[in-house]
Amino acid sequence: MTSHASRVLVLNSGSSSVKYQLLDMTDGTRLALGLVERIGEETSRLSHTPLVSGGAKREHEGPIADHEAALKAVATELAADGLGLDSPELAAIGHRVVHGGLKFTVPTVIDDAVLAEIERLVPVAPLHNPANITGIRTAQALRPDLPQVAVFDTAFHTTMPEYAARYAIDVATADAHRIRRYGFHGTSHAYVSRQTAALLGKDPAETNVIVLHLGNGASASAVAGGRCMDTSMGLTPLEGLVMGTRSGDIDPAVTFHLKRVAGMSADEIDVLLNKKSGLLGLCGDNDMREIRRRIEEGDERAQLAFDIYIHRLKKYIGAYTAVLGHVDAVAFTAGVGENAAPVREAAIAGLEELGLAVDAGLNAVRSDAPRLISPEYSRVAVAVVPTDEELEIAQQTYALVNA
Ligand code: AMP
């Protein structure tokens, strides 16, 4: 590889969207970022923001038939900024891949065998892996000569102890169908737990952190010295915390009940629990900003949804305190965790016995920087640590192709 190839394109391909960022890894600078939405519809939308030489955001609406057309449109936008994908400065393309099963514990250069294995995992990630595979194939067709790297959402959690990863069900049945707790958002949990240690001025290998990744999807993890000991998502991203549209933990018998008594099909139950539940199902809104606005106006449904969300969060903070034994910090991250001070305040309220407290003044400060929001006397630090999955994917990709 030529020594000046220092750029990495990060692709996050969803079923009808592609998010991307182009970074320069000499210093981690972002050169451009954007999003293609509603791929395959008449009203597809591309928004592209060049971050070099003062370029302004550009938006285009109009049909984009498939992922290939989407990536070609992205390539055209990048080329217009002098950042074309044919540039010799592009070192690699890093792909977010949601499910890596047990096999992929580290970022991996993609070849036919790797792609076949990602495909083999489709039954355990039917919503995510097919889109990731399409993204990879499209990028390969565009730049067949370039290393393409898969960075797995599950990788960080593969070090979970067996007792945390197994469900207490018949072992033969579980193994035959690869049913176990894989966990997701791993790139974020890895990044945020390391950044939290840095914020405390400690070695990550000697720091125990509870990471609360609260976005539209949400998950918690218990990280001891850089190793994931438990995480709240399981076989799929449905388990655990109350999310924007997902129920999180429920009695599995609810699903039999819905089938037997309500006559719903497996697919209908899947849609109910993944897309129509959580905050949305509880109060009709999944955006925490809107829920807080309604609460300010005295809306009781919004208040109850908020209380259920917080109650679940508290249960996980307590559980992971017990799992870790000693906790150095609780770190809030992602859209809700980074922005919603009332969520942080409510989640920590009453947990003084666990050594946790939030300083109201510090909690109210808005900032993009990692910061502490606990008072001096707090035994356990409470932190807000912005996540950066794209930077983490780019760093892992770049490190791998330069190894
Ligand atoms: P993410 O999935 O990490 O992009 O997070 C998206 C979610 O973050 C949105 O659905 C909102 O609920 C939440 N969010 C973003 N900004 C704010 C804010 N200023 N206050 C409260 N919640 C926010």
Image (spheres, grey):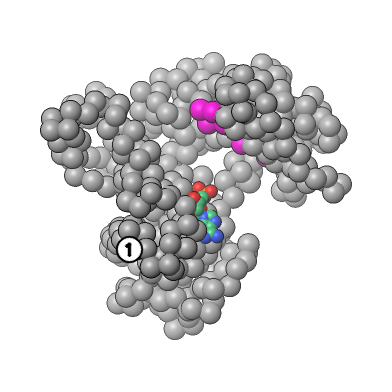
Q: Would you place residue 144 above or below residue 266 in this image?
A: above
Across and down, in percent, residue 55 comes to: 83, 45
Across and down, in percent, residue 123 comes to: 36, 23
- Position of 131 with respect to 398 (left or right) is left
Circle 1 residue: 300
Task: Tell me if I can see residue 194 in this picture.
Answer: no
Q: Quadrant of the C terminus?
A: top right
Q: Would you place residue 29 above or below residue 128 in this image?
A: below
Q: Residue at x 65, y 23 (%)?
A: 63
Task: Tell me if I can see residue 247 in this picture.
Answer: yes
Q: Is residue 16 magenta?
A: yes
Q: Would you place residue 230 above or below residue 113 in this image?
A: below
What SS does tag 1 mark?
A: helix
Q: Is residue 48 magenta?
A: no
Q: Residue at x 73, y 46 (%)?
A: 30
Q: Which residue is drawn at 72% across and 26% down?
A: 73
Q: Would you place residue 194 above or below residue 186 in this image?
A: below
Name the amino acid, label 1. Answer: Glu
Across and down, in percent, residue 153 comes to: 47, 39
Q: Quadrant of residue 364?
A: bottom right
Across and down, in percent, residue 336 comes to: 48, 57
Q: Which of 272 and 136 is in front in this view?
A: 272
Q: Nearer the viewer, residue 76 or 292?
A: 292
Q: Looking at mark 1, is its residue's CB closer than 8 Å to ligand 1?
A: no
Tell me where the magenta segment starts and ends, as one range: 13-21
Q: Quadrant of the N terminus?
A: top right
- Position of 112 with respect to 247 (left or right) is right
Q: Quadrant of residue 178?
A: top left
| Number of residues whose C-alpha sits closer than 10 Å to that of mark 1, classed few (under 14), some (14–19) or many (20 or more) | few
